[in-house]
């Protein structure tokens, strides 16, 4: 049994639903806030996720950072060195999807050359009539960035567990890979 | 230098921030570099070695992997508290083999040594052996 710990950045444009997703993670889906209240700094949420088919778990320290451009710089100081990335866009906003590559660049500057596994989340899947981003397009871009793609609705509590499980699995397999490497080291 | 493990001298690891039960912190002081303690994510990481009695230490040698910055503190009390800085080192990255580094501690006496790994070359680091030179 191993308990891993990961610092997970929750990023994406303003109003895509990062804090709403965070609430879902936290309350296991009882608390959806209809009224938008902008995050102005960073919020921290700890969520323990069991890795399926193992006895291991990952404690995710999720950092919900403000998406509004003018606030990002101040927030970046609190990002620290991330272990995982959860990048969110709004399926009804092409613009929020286009911003994702910009967010990736920002994150890389904090990774100190380390590979940081992550997921791309298309949120607000309940607003299907207003959809602007096709799943296949998002999926393709996610793959090109080495991210796993999920669609969620924080409002309808749809599929909100999937990104968390994806993150936990990714960190767990990275740990196993590294442990393998360490077991095969030669003496100094 | 007498090459006996710290365990056989009565030392213990009393605190470690991470634990994988297959790679427990005791592996740090068993004198064997094929067994190791592995961190399980995020920095800083630390472990504390407690000696059976106050021990004069001129230097410690640390066998590790992917550790970038290591800071060492000590105390002379019975409890694992009130630590004072004694040394630190920026470790070089190694590929495929263990990092071996000596850190000078100026021949001070200690009952506890606290090792703080403030950063790493990867998400996870390992410590294979700590030995002390008297
Ligand atoms: N229909 C629908 N609305 C959602 C969903 N998720 C969030 N919202 C709404 O979108 C608005 C913004 O949500 P937030 O979670 O505050 O957005 P945010 O990404 O945290 O925004 P910043 O804190 O400014 O970066 C709120 O009015 C939410 O109620 C969803 O899945 N479906
Ligand atoms: Mg928010």
Image (tube, coloured by chain):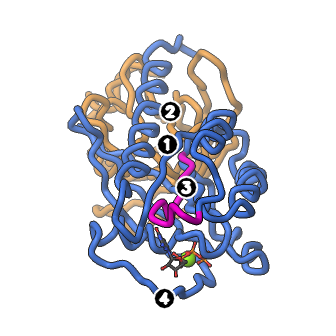
Chain colours: A blue, B orange
Mark 3, other Cα within 10 Å: few <14 / some 14–19 / many ≥20 = many
Label annotation for residue B133: 2
In this view, the residue in front, A146 or A183, is A146
Q: Residue at x 50, y 56 (%)?
A: A7
4 and 3 marks on the same chain? yes
Q: What is the secondary structure assignment of the residue under circle 2? A: strand
Q: Could you give the CA–CA distance between mark 4 and mark 3, rounded to whole angstroms?
A: 20 Å
Which chain's residue wears label 4? A
Q: Which mark is residue B57?
A: 1
Disc 4 Cβ-to-ligand 1 distance below 8 Å: yes
Q: Where is residue B92 in the image (x, y as percent from the top left)?
A: 71, 32
Instruction: Identify the image quadrant of residue A188.
Output: top right
Question: Around disc 4, counting alpha carbons within 10 Å, would you say few (fewer than 14), some (14 to 19), or many (20 or more)?
Answer: few
Secondary structure at badge 4 equals: loop
Residue tagged by mark 3? A122
Q: Is residue A100 visible?
A: yes
Q: Nearer the viewer, mark 4 or mark 1?
A: 4
Q: Where is residue A32 in the image (x, y as percent from the top left)?
A: 37, 78
Residue A105 disc label: none
Residue A88 shown left or right of residue B38 in the figure:
right
Chain bearing mark 2? B
Q: With B11 as the anchor, is B44 left or right in this view?
A: right
CA gap between label 4 and label 1 equals 62 Å
Tell me which residue sits at (70%, 70%) in the image: A77
- Distance between mark 2 and mark 1 Cα atoms: 6 Å
Q: Is residue A49 above or below residue A157?
A: above
Residue span colored magenta: A119-130
Q: Name the residue under label 4.
A: A35
* Labels 2 and 1 positioned on one and the same chain: yes
Q: Along the line of sight, which residue is nearer the eye, A135 or A33?
A: A135
């Amino acid at each position: 049994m191993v308990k891993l710990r990961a610092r997970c950045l929750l990023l994406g444009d303003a109003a895509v639903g990062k804090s709403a997703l965070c609430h879902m993670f936290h309350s296991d889906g009882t608390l959806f806030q209809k009224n938008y209240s902008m995050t102005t700094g960073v919020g921290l949420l700890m969520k323990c996720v069991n890795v399926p088919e193992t006895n291991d778990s990952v404690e995710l320290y999720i950092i919900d950072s403000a998406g509004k451009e003018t606030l990002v710089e101040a927030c970046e100081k609190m990002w620290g060195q991330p272990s995982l990335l959860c990048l969110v866009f709004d399926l009804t906003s092409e613009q929020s999807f286009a911003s994702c590559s910009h967010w990736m660049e920002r994150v890389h500057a904090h990774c100190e050359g380390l590979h940081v596994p992550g997921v791309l989340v298309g949120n607000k899947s309940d607003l299907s009539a207003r959809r602007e981003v096709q799943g296949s397009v998002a999926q393709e871009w996610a793959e090109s960035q080495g991210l796993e793609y999920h669609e969620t609705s924080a409002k309808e509590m749809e599929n909100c567990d999937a990104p968390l499980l994806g993150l936990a699995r990714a960190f767990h397999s990275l740990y196993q890979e590294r442990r393998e490497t360490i077991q095969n080291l030669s003496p100094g | 230098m007498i090459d006996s493990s710290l365990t056989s001298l009565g030392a213990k690891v009393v605190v470690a921030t991470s634990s994988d039960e297959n790679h427990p912190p005791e592996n740090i002081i068993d004198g064997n570099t094929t067994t190791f303690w592995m961190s399980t994510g995020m920095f800083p990481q630390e472990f504390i070695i407690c000696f059976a009695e106050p021990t004069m230490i001129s230097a410690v040698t640390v066998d590790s992997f992917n550790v970038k910055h290591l800071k060492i503190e000590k105390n002379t009390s019975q409890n694992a508290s009130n630590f004072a800085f004694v040394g630190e080192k920026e470790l070089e990255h190694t590929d495929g083999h263990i990092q071996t580094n000596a850190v000078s501690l100026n021949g001070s006496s200690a009952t506890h040594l606290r090792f703080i790994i403030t950063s790493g070359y990867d998400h996870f680091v390992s410590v294979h052996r700590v030995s002390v030179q008297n």
